[in-house]
Amino acid sequence: MRCKECGAEMPQGAVFCGVCGALVTNDTDTGFDNRPEPPTPDNSIICKHCGAKLHPNAVYCDACGMPVYNDQTDNSITCVKCGAKLTPDTLFCGICGEPVNRGGGMPNPAPQPAQKPKALFIVCICAAFVALAAIVATTAYVIMARDAAQVNSTASNTGTSAGTSQQQPAGNIATLAPVAAPTAQPTVNYSGEYLFPSDSVYIQDADLAGKSQNEVRLILNEIYARNGYIFNTDYYRQYFSTKSWYVPITSSQEECERRFNSIERANKEFIAKYEQARGWR
């Protein structure tokens, strides 16, 4: 028989039309006509529910009304109401009559969570670049400041190096190079090999009391002479060359000062402050 609404072929005993979903009550229902059905071809298929032979293009079984599908290419869909398997081109469920969704009869998939905005990621990247730039700038500034300080220190040492005939500027305690020769010979007649044991005894104010500027400076230069400094001034060079312990090694003030022990370094700074306090620097 055929559906009077859509003209689709309907099997005997069908409950619903497999195309339009119209309800079938009995064979004499006015909604259907009983025109003769075409013969079933030889390539008929078998209903897996009741074993009836079906037309190869059948969507539902003529005997039991169950949907027909191929196991090898099972692209069937499921009714969302009763769970029956349906063919992809079915519009209504042949069991319960539920309309089939255009999306394949299955319940609508759960909505996917919205993608997180990329603004936060971009902000983090920008913040990282800003922080990196700040670190680089700070590092460069520190390096430049250190280099500038080293250049200034070198310039100060050069301006006050041994052999100059000018008096050192006052307040420059860090620069303690041997000074120029005194304009007059020391009034004190130094006897012995050393003016002061400055490599093993800390100098005190009492040790320098009553001595002239030239005599104090000679004690300072003796610290340099102990460590092999080669003087450019004839007076100091001739004076220390008469000492048996004097061994000329270097004309570099920095290299000579690196040879100082802790006591000699402290005595050098003490004499510098002593001269500064009296305006000799």
Image (cartoon, rainbow, N blue to C red):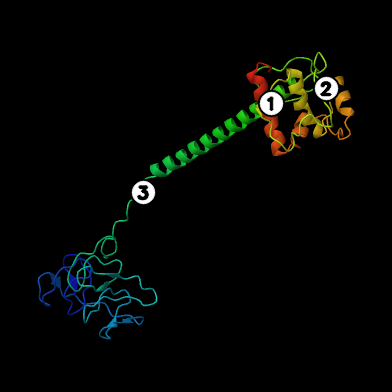
Looking at the rendered structure, the secondary structure element under dot 3 is loop
**In the image, what residue occupies the spot 29% across and 56% down?**
111
Label 1 sits on residue: 271
Marks 3 and 1: which is nearer the front?
Answer: 1
Image marks 3 and 2: residues in contact by CB distance under 8 Å: no
Label 3 sits on residue: 116
The image shows residue 133, relative to residue 100, as above or below, that is above
Label 2 sits on residue: 189
Name the quarter where the C terminus is drawn. Answer: top right
Q: Nearer the viewer, residue 172 or 97?
A: 172
Q: Nearer the viewer, residue 141 or 175?
A: 175
Badge 3, how many Cα within 10 Å: few under 14, some, many 20+?
A: few
Disc on res. 220: none
Figure quadrant of residue 205: top right
Q: Nearer the viewer, residue 98 or 220?
A: 220
Visible residue check, residue 117: yes
Q: Position of residue 161 (x, y in %)?
A: 76, 23
Q: Position of residue 133 (x, y in %)?
A: 53, 35
Q: Amino acid at mark 3?
A: Lys
N-terminal of the pair, mark 3 or mark 1, is: 3
State how far apart marks 3 and 2 are (Cα). Answer: 92 Å
Figure quadrant of residue 32: bottom left
Q: Position of residue 50 (x, y in %)?
A: 25, 85
N-terminal of the pair, mark 3 or mark 2, is: 3
Q: Amino acid at mark 2?
A: Asn
Asked if residue 93 lies left or right of residue 200, the reply is left
The image shows residue 74, relative to residue 217, as above or below, that is below
Looking at the rendered structure, the secondary structure element under dot 1 is helix
